[in-house]
Amino acid sequence: MRRIQAGNVLSAFGLGFTVPYLYVYVAQVRDLGAGTAGAVLAVFAMAALVVLPFTGRAIDRRGPLPVLVGASLLAAVGALGMGLAGSVTTVVGAAALLGAGTAVMQPALATMIVWCSSTSTRTRAFAMQFFLQNLGLGIGGLIGGQLVDESRPDSFLLLFSIEAAMFLVLAGIAATVRMPRTPAITDARPEGRGGGLRALLGHRAMVQLCVLGFVLFFACYGQFESGLAAYGTEAAGLEPSALGMALAANTAVIVVAQFLVLRFVERRRRTRVIAWVGLIWTVAWLFAGYAGLGHGSQAMATAAFIATYGLFGLGEAMLSPTVAPLVADLAPESMVGQYNSAFALVKQLALAVGPAVGGPMGAALHGPYIVTFVLFSLGITVLALRLGRRLTPAQDHPYLVAKSRVVAQHRPEQPVEAAA
């Protein structure tokens, strides 16, 4: 588990090095224009949508280790190719390789965590993964920002070379791991028979979780750098530096709160925790509404906007030890990879649709934008409570089930006289 988590933080560190600067690199440094830069970002996302439907079956048939090693090597080639690319064709091709490789890593790493954990340790394992991902992305972006220089293309080649090296190190670490197999929850079986997509679609609880996941990612992550940023600059009149402070506040809240909220989260029903996240994000969107539609000072608007991102971070810290373990506990043992890949595909779809819908609304339709996402956040609460009715106690509240089993195992026997 330690090796898996080390590989996880290294891959996040590598991505943090380059992803924030892709647009600037393609449009300005390589002088290929804004249209090409937008196409590169679109290809980066579309490559994930292409490969993820096939990833789960490969993980379940071959195991997550060879899939992770292959994805790391593919991403390393894409990163190095991006640093060397000088034409539209080579830049787009490198973006496709990088996007495909990094997308496949997510379900492979998630499946490795499932195999290396039990139902009692899985919550903390996924919380640690999310914590390290954000830490790696933040540190990578911070260091990368100090190294890049738009007047020196060689500085970007250095960045992409470091990213490629991180992926190669990830492949090397993964190759040294010996994977155990931890049994899944015994009653986590789809309602249909057989396997593959038909079985997954026949599992109503998983389908409901995918719908809930789409709304979660659409209403939060899909708005961070598009709709919410456009709304902040257009409606609230914020400076770009204020957006940077808001994103920093989001990361800081996640890093600080992750393990503070863990004890609260793991002792409660997972669906109730997700429902609380919906309410917290509702308040976050109301803060955003005050920032853009209120009549306070610029300082108050900036503070409200930073609070919005901070509340999103609190919700993310509550979701990380909740949603991913729930996907794992819903999956039959032979389909863990397919369930993780399906949920990763849902996330990727939400991240693709979110900016396309939220960006124009956030820039031009300020009032309707806030109302729409307040309703989406309340919808998270409703969907979570409905999902809770379909889950078994072992899936929704594993802590209580594990505790009751321990008590039953250690319950003293009654004396014969008392029994008589």
Image: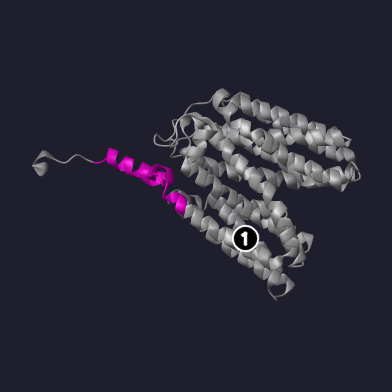
Q: Residue at x 74, y 47 (%)?
A: 142
Here the colouring is one colour
Between residue 196 and residue 288, name the one nearer to us.
196
The magenta stretch spans which residues? Answer: 386-411
112 relative position to 289: left or right: left
Give the image location of residue 108, x and y in percent.
59, 32
Q: Residue at x 89, y 46 (%)?
A: 33
Whether residue 398 is in magenta: the answer is: yes
Give the image location of residue 112, x and y in percent.
55, 32
Residue that extends furthest to the bottom in the rendered view of this protein:
295
Callout 1: helix, strand or loop? helix
Q: Residue at x 84, y 40 (%)?
A: 156
268 relative position to 50: left or right: left
**The N terminus: image quadrant:** top right
Q: Which residue is mark 1?
A: 373
Give the image location of residue 368, x and y in percent.
67, 65
